[in-house]
Image (spheres, grey):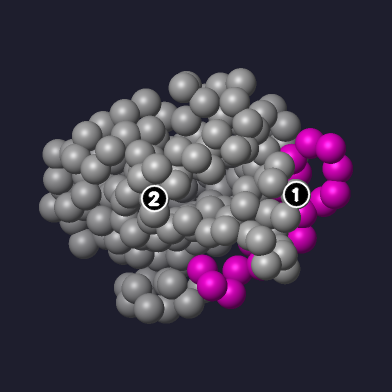
Amino acid sequence: MRAHHGYRLSGGPEVKRSHLLMPLLLAGLALASATVVGCSSSTVTSSTTPPTSAPPTTGVGSTSPTAATTSSAAASTSTAWLSGGETVPPVDTEATGAATFTVDASGDRIHFSLSVANLTDPDSSRVHQGATGSNGPGVLILLSGRYGQGQVTGTIASGSFDAAVFIGPLEGKNIADFVALLESGQAYVSVGSVTNPSGEIRGQIR
């Protein structure tokens, strides 16, 4: 367990060693919900049990913080579909993934969820600034370390964050700047693995 500025961390998710189909993965994304503790700084809590053999390290909140939901009609959601073919250069892998980012009613927080399917030894994930077909600097850490061992299918990171966690070109910026980056199509999610630490799957956020 380690702390990141603006967050309280706890726990991590249970690794499921299975070969689930992407429809089941995406259904799990749609159903994920929990509660964010109301306070002035971002708070993320865990909802599942970490693997006992290799407890994961954390990034923006936790490898498996509980995702918060919002009932506001004004909330907007951006999605990234990840695959090896989107990585630069492309990676030959059966792994896939999906990430969602939803702005809450206050406009001061974003709730996110990151899931993968058939990804062996996940290791770190970030949101990067960059256009399709090019690599760019990281602006947000979603997962900052190894997630269990072996092939993983399921949610590997989820929770909520505020502007305090931005890095690189977005350091010192606000949530509106992050949202503008997503809406411009100039941001992508990359998930690495032990075999491909710089990125095994990737997807542009739209």
- Which percent across, then down, holds residue 150? 35, 56
Identify the mark nearer the N-term, 2 or 1: 1
Element under label 1?
Answer: loop
Image quarter (top left, top right, bottom left or bottom right) of the N terminus: top right
Extent of the magenta region: 29-48
Query: Viewer-proximal residue, 192 or 129?
Result: 129
- Which percent across, then down, holds residue 144? 49, 36
Element under label 2?
Answer: loop
- Is 192 colored magenta in this rendering? no
Query: Viewer-proximal residue, 140 or 125?
Result: 140
Q: Which residue is mark 2?
A: 205
> Residue at (62%, 37%) from the top-left corner?
175
Q: Which residue is mark 1?
A: 106
Question: Label 2 neighbourhood size at 10 Å, few (<14), some (14-19), many (20+)?
Answer: many
> Residue at (33%, 49%) from the top-left corner?
204
Give the alpha-carbon distance from disc 2 to disc 1, as whole Å.
Answer: 22 Å
The answer to whether one can see residue 156 in this image is yes
State left or right for residue 153 relative to residue 170.
left
Disc 1 residue type?
A: Ser
Magenta segment's dominant SS is loop
Q: How many marks?
A: 2
Name the disc covering residue 59, or none: none
- Which percent across, then down, holds residue 105? 72, 55
> Residue at (38%, 33%) from the top-left corner?
129
